[in-house]
């Protein structure tokens, strides 16, 4: 494989917290068998971004796309993550790293959340 | 109106943080004109849940559905929110309060996040 995807979330002391993030990764693998997806966390939950990226690259990856799994776009998505990406680029020359906007800002995700909140409420 | 919906998110010191939450509310109003939707926050961003609910009820609401706008389901969604709902029920007898699961756990939202992360990465 040449392209890996990292779902990057905040992390939590709560062991159940990351289940939905892992569920998105599982759904991606079901939709696109063979796709290389890893989850990574800013703090409190393992693995961290550097560890997840290293595993993807050990598998032969030459490009990595990072998706911030945030609904709101605060300091973590706008400041911490670009800094982490800069470090990755320094550590892994020759690898292309792409940072996407927070997933909660994507129009399709916004739209589905709106329809979900409307639809389930009316049942 | 008889039914109000609250989108409940964490809140942040960052003023731009809540834009996607407000965008979901705006999308809901566009999809269902006349629907009463309010945003509320656990901390750092206003209004809080009690204030948002009071405004919905002042408009004639008799039932309120609360959607936790979280991707992961940690302490806030599983402990803080049920406690806040208990307080609301005590303060507003005769009003029906319904607490939904975290929006990030809904199968449609999980699926859309997975398709978004796959689709945008392949472009």
Image: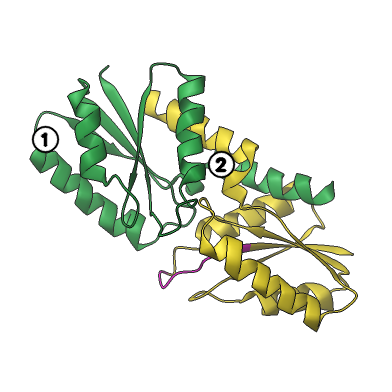
Chain colours: A yellow, B green
In this view, A98 is above or below A107 = below
Q: Which residue was labeled with disc 2? A: B109
In this view, A21 is above or below B50 = below
Residue A11 is covered by the magenta coloring: yes
Tell which of A94 and A31 is nearer to you: A94
Residue A5 is covered by the magenta coloring: no
Mark 1 → mark 2, Cα distance in angstroms: 31 Å
* Mark 1 or mark 2, earlier in chain: 1
Position of residue A99 measured from the top left corner of the image (x, y, whole percent)? 72, 60
In this view, B115 is above or below A46 = above
Task: Give the chain of mark 1.
Answer: B
- Whether residue A40 is visible here, answered yes or no, is no
* Neighbour tally class for label 1: few under 14, some 14-19, many 20 plus, Cα within 10 Å: some
Tell which of A13 and A63 is nearer to you: A63
Residues shaded magenta: A8-14
Question: Viewed as shown, does residue B93 lie left or right of B107?
Answer: left
Position of residue A72 measured from the top left corner of the image (x, y, whole percent)? 50, 52
In this view, B35 is above or below B22 = above
Tell which of B13 and B36 is nearer to you: B13
Q: What residue is rendered at 59% in x and 45% in y?
A: A105
Q: What residue is rendered at 20% in x and 53% in y?
A: B83
Give the quarter of the figure containing the N terminus of chain B.
Answer: top left
Checking the image for residue B112, the label placed there is: none
Checking the image for residue B92, the label placed there is: 1
Q: Main secondary structure of the magenta part?
A: loop
Q: What residue is rendered at 52% in x and 43% in y?
A: B20
Q: Nearer the viewer, mark 1 or mark 2?
A: 1
Position of residue B27 measured from the top left corner of the image (x, y, whole percent)? 51, 29
* Neighbour tally class for label 2: few under 14, some 14-19, many 20 plus, Cα within 10 Å: many
Task: Give the chain of mark 2.
Answer: B
């Amino acid at each position: 494989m040449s392209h890996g995807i990292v779902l990057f979330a905040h992390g939590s002391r709560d062991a159940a917290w990351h289940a939905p993030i892992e569920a998105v990764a599982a759904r991606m693998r079901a939709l696109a068998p063979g796709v290389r997806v890893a989850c990574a966390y800013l703090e409190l939950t393992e693995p961290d971004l550097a560890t997840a990226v290293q595993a993807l690259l050990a598998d032969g990856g030459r490009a990595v796309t990072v998706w911030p799994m945030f609904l709101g776009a605060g300091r973590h998505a706008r400041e911490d993550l670009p800094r982490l990406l800069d470090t990755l680029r320094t550590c892994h020359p020759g690898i292309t790293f792409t940072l996407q906007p927070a997933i909660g800002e994507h129009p399709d995700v916004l739209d589905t959340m709106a329809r979900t909140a409307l639809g389930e409420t009316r049942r």
